[in-house]
Image: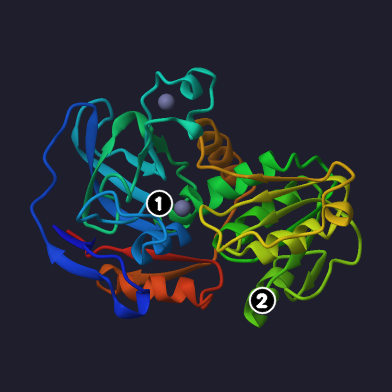
Amino acid sequence: MRCAVLAAPAPITQRPLTIEEIPLPEASPGHVLLRVKACGVCRTDLHIVEGELPPLHPRIIPGHQIVGEVVAGAGIPIGTRVGVSWLGGTDGICAYCRRGAENLCDAPVYTGYSVNGGYAQFALVRADFTVPLPDTLDDLAAAPLLCAGIIGFRSLRMAGVQQGERVGLFGFGASAHLALPVLQAWNCEVYVSTRGESHRKLAQDLGAHWVGSERDRPPVPLDRAITFAPSGDVVISALASLRKGGVVAVNAIHLDRIPEFDYDSLLWGERQIRSVANMTRADARDFLALAAEINLRPRVTVFPLDQANDALLAVKNDAIDGAAVILPPGI
Ligand SMILES: [Zn+2]
Ligand SMILES: [Zn+2]
């Protein structure tokens, strides 16, 4: 099968992914083999490829927003279309799994990081960590929902968003552009602060209540804020926009740093900062059901598998409005 392999992390400008032909993955108990129909590109892939997340294997195929069709294995009928996300498995027995927090599992499997992912024609995945996909979502529309969408949705939950609140989105890439329609469905006022003229335009087109640059402060205190950029400065900007008792949820697996900040003016008043780690299968199910209900349509830019490096470079440069999706060659 054709795939994109990372052997040595490096800046994406050095094109660290190589396109290769390798044997099909071998069947394994509890797993199904998927023919990959589309795979979304996530900023986490960039952190893996550039080495901000340390390598776990000498060679890995990235990609954790897989739309695929079951072609072999047990437990799911052949021909079924399923989705696979970042959480590719858990041990099911650790203290976190037992208390229903499988996103914090002590022995997790991460698709495209601890096991091979979807930048490939085929992927071997745990059957019990696939999610059914609503028929209303075609392959290209479904792919970005599987991490950008689900984890954006979890971020809204972790921020404690209530109906009708004022919510800030700091950064406006793949995840934020999917969170916005969810907030609108909850009758929230959405305030978007982002760099990049085209990202601001997209936020405006999608009906944000207020849109500003990364240097502008939303005009009213916010109940909740979610940050999407891998930048601690953005977390502090979000914190500075909150009312007393407000919450910042940080939707980033990696941050450059957290700068020193003034406790009295920024955190006092029961303001909170919390990170958002991974996702649960319940998040996936709930979000995909909601996405079908509100007819969520991602803005998508397609890259052939052979251009996987270009797709990641575009994500790094914020050059894509919405989400990038990789299409493997048909079989
Ligand atoms: Zn566990
Ligand atoms: Zn992701």
Q: Amino acid at mark 1?
A: Gln
Going by the picture, which residue comes out furthest to the left? 23
Quarter residue 172 falls in = bottom right
Identify which residue, 188 or 166, lies in the foreground. Answer: 166
Identify which residue, 299 or 85, lies in the foreground. Answer: 85
**Sequence order check, earlier mark of 2 and 1:** 1
Q: Residues within 10 Å of mark 1 (few under 14, many from 20)?
A: many
Measured in 3D between alpha carbons, the distance from the residue under mark 2 to the one under mark 1, in whole angstroms, is 25 Å
Q: Amino acid at mark 2?
A: Arg
Q: Which residue is mark 2?
A: 195
From the viewer's perspective, is 30 left or right of 26?
A: right
Image quarter of the N terminus: bottom left
Residue in the image at 61% along x and 65% along y? 231
Identify which residue, 60 or 315, lies in the foreground. Answer: 60
Image quarter of the C terminus: bottom left
Q: Quarter of the picture for ligand 1? A: top left
Quarter residue 154 falls in = top right
Q: Which residue is mark 1?
A: 65
| Residue 261 picture location, percent across and down | 76, 59
Disc 1 C-beta below 8 A from ligand 2: yes
